[in-house]
Amino acid sequence: MGNKTRVKSSNQFIGMLKSNTGILCVMILIGITLSFMTPNFLTAGNIISVLRQISNNIFLALGMTLVIILGGIDLSVGSIVAMSGTLTVGFIVTNGVPMMPAILAGLTLGTMVGLFNGFIVARFRVPAFIVTLSTMNMAKGIAYIYSGGRSTRITSDAYAMIGTGYLFGVVPLPVVYMIILIIIFVILLNKTRFGTYVYAVGGNRESARLSGVPIKKVEILVFTISGFLAAFAGIVLSSRMYSGQPKAGDGYEMDAIAACVLGGISMAGGTGHVSGTVIGAVVIGIISNGLNLIGVSSFWQLLVKGLIILVAVIIDSQKNIISERFGKKKSSK
Amino acid sequence: MEDKVILQMEGISKRFGATQALDEINFELRLGEVHALLGENGAGKSTLIKVLGGIHKPDEGIIKINGQEIEMNGIQDARNSGIGIIHQEIVLVPYLTVTENIFLGREILTPLRTRDLRKMNELALDMTERLGLHIDVTTKVGNLSIAQQQMVEIVKAISFNVKILVMDEPTSSLSDEEVGKLFETMDRLKKEHVSIIYISHRMEELFAVTDRVTVMRDGTYVGTVNTKETNVDSLVGMMVGRSLTNYYTRDYNMTDQEVLRVEDITRAGVFQNVSFSVHKGEILGFSGLVGAGRSEIMQAIFGNDSFESGKVFLSGKEVKFKSSMEAIQSGVAMVPEDRKKQGLTLINSVGFNMTLASLGSVMKGPLLSETKRSRVIGKYIDELNIKTASADIAVSSLSGGNQQKVVLAKWLATNPRLLILDEPTRGVDVGAKAEIYAIINRLAGQGMAIIMISSELPEIINMCDNVCVVREGKIVGRLGHEELNQEEIMRFATGGE
């Protein structure tokens, strides 16, 4: 099914459409419904704002895509968002560190958490769920200890630019980062040796090991990338909020996982595409946005969002079952 | 064996989309006989069994049990008609006891609606003993050997009052000794008037245990013969539709140029003082019982495991690989024993699997080159005659023989000078076996040094230049190809006189 496109290069776009039919239908359905319900949905301004909203989830979901294809899960990313934002802003405001070194330090520390996750998973073979559950608490703890639980305001215009600036005056910078990262990830997964190794380890670790794949390196690198992206997302988010908040990023890991699952990435590992994750994140984005536009209260939004995600996944899984049955009948002798 | 017919399947046809999976198949089973169902992968054996088991409904044809036509609308109908199927993979719950597994879903209850474990244990013990399986029925199934688990499956099937038992490749993961035990059990079952349909690719087993053989090919019925009145060649002929004159292809052209020399390698408790050497163009066989340590020796040389003392020389240079990666870089390749667990990433495509071990050679700068990659894939699909609709389909959809060729292609693409083959034809049908033998012979002819571990004596005898027999981690016998025969090898392998 999904892995058909990997070897092909010519009609990759059609392959992408094929492997994501279910979720694409859901997306279009929601889009059409919303554009009838509210005239504001299909305006340029709103579309850009949706893109900006989803950018943060995409940063995390891209890393999560690698982790899940590898057969793991990363629960620590939401906390890394909080940690890197709090620490970076804190370094600048409280400790008077210049902006660039502070950002570098924030990125490095977040990346270190990812590296730590990967090291423990690869070296001790502890399930990723448990390892990242622990580091989720640890990273959050560090953010609270450092800040004493208070958020820190930052007034630097240069820092604010990172998350609130525009390219050519129209495209928000986070959207620009998002597009660049998506391109990098598509190439990474489809065109590099590392990408192939990620699929191989997730598909069958033992076979990958015997085939000479440096599995430990691959595992460590995947979690490190996830940590780095989370740290990056934390800095962008703190810039958009003009403050470092230890409460930020709460539950973000779940949105990232939801995007992957909606995008058809198997939790069992070994299969999945960046395109799926991106569409998944867009679906989650337009649901939130649409509910806002219609004027649903934020309490109700959670309930409705959860339901819509569940229904979308059910539709998608049924599509898989139907096509599987159909495909099996065709191929069996 | 009596002549009373218990099961008749007449004119069974089944079509899936455009594929005619079964075309007017006739099958007859007599009371208390062991009847082999033989055919290459894709011949329709499993579809026929699924029809019998109520999983597929036939488009045409009738099924009669004891002369009475029955309607099969589901698994329950089959079960009620006394049909039991033992699948190739064991489907017991490892964390439950033998008794709990046997009675799973139909527990005997006390008047208080709790489980009557005492009674169930008694019954289970009785059933296991009757089949000659002497085990503690309160042990967890996960603690039993594969062979014992399989026996538990049989006991479970029998406990459903089964009259017709289907066994699908029951010996594929058993050692010779365990196979013997299984055959004893089958004898007991026959005496209890259970009729058995037996599916296996191992010819010698068919001759050891079956009364009649029905051969299928491409979904059609070829014929039924009495086992006593046929031989391997004629059965193979029926299966493939032509006679395979040269089942084994072998030109002996070993050179004296040494590729690998192993001196006294030891890993305590696993293998001791193992020494041997392989030359260009040589096929060196490793024979012995399952568990003798053959695979472990190769895994250690390949860097996937370690050895404590001793030396390994590759083309005269001492090496000690710390990982498979290092071994591959030095030109050593290993086709592992278990295709599904170690050889392939089943969910990925044919092409993906074929190039996984040699990605370094299909790069263009930092990126993978699709052109180079498809060139490699195309080359091996042609050279090894891999039958696949495209390189992009999941490797799991290929037949066993073609999957094995994909594994072989993966390793040949690394350009090895030493190729280690661990059970290269396990679970592969005869046609593909002959092809794989021809490929191995061709590789040796091209000057590759080959080590072949195999539990199938005929292939060891017909393919190898030299053979090392391993018992309990030691090489206990060395034979040249002119002195190879089954008795000699077994004498060394079992330590008998």
Image: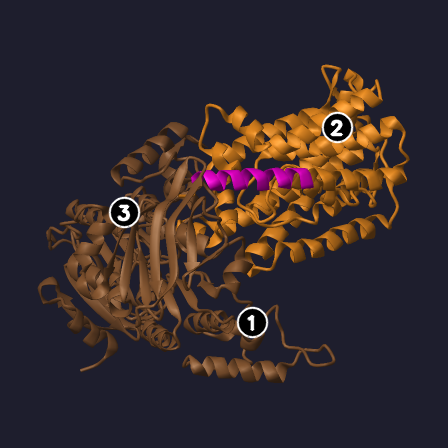
Judged by depth in the image, the label closer to the viewer, 2 or 3, is: 2
Q: Position of residue B286 (x, y in %)?
A: 24, 64
Query: Which residue position holds label 1?
Result: B101
Mark 2–mark 1 Cα distance, whole angstroms, equals 48 Å
Q: Position of residue B362 (x, y in %)?
A: 37, 34
Structural distance between the alpha carbons of marks 2 and 3 = 55 Å
Q: Which one is in front, B30 or B179?
A: B30
Q: Is residue B263 visible?
A: no
**Label 3: which residue?**
B416
Q: Residue at x 84, y 21 (%)?
A: A38
Kind of residue indicated by mark 2: Ile
Question: Mark 3 falls on what kind of element?
Answer: loop
Q: Residues within 10 Å of mark 1 (few under 14, many from 20)?
A: many
**In the depicted structure, whether residue A26 falls above or below residue A70:** above
Report whether residue B252 is seen.
Answer: yes
In the rendered image of the structure, the colour used to display chain B is brown
Tint of chain A = orange
Q: Please state the extent of the stretch shown in magenta in the rendering.
A: A314-331
| Label 3 Cα neighbours within 10 Å, binned few <14 / some 14-19 / many ≥20 | many
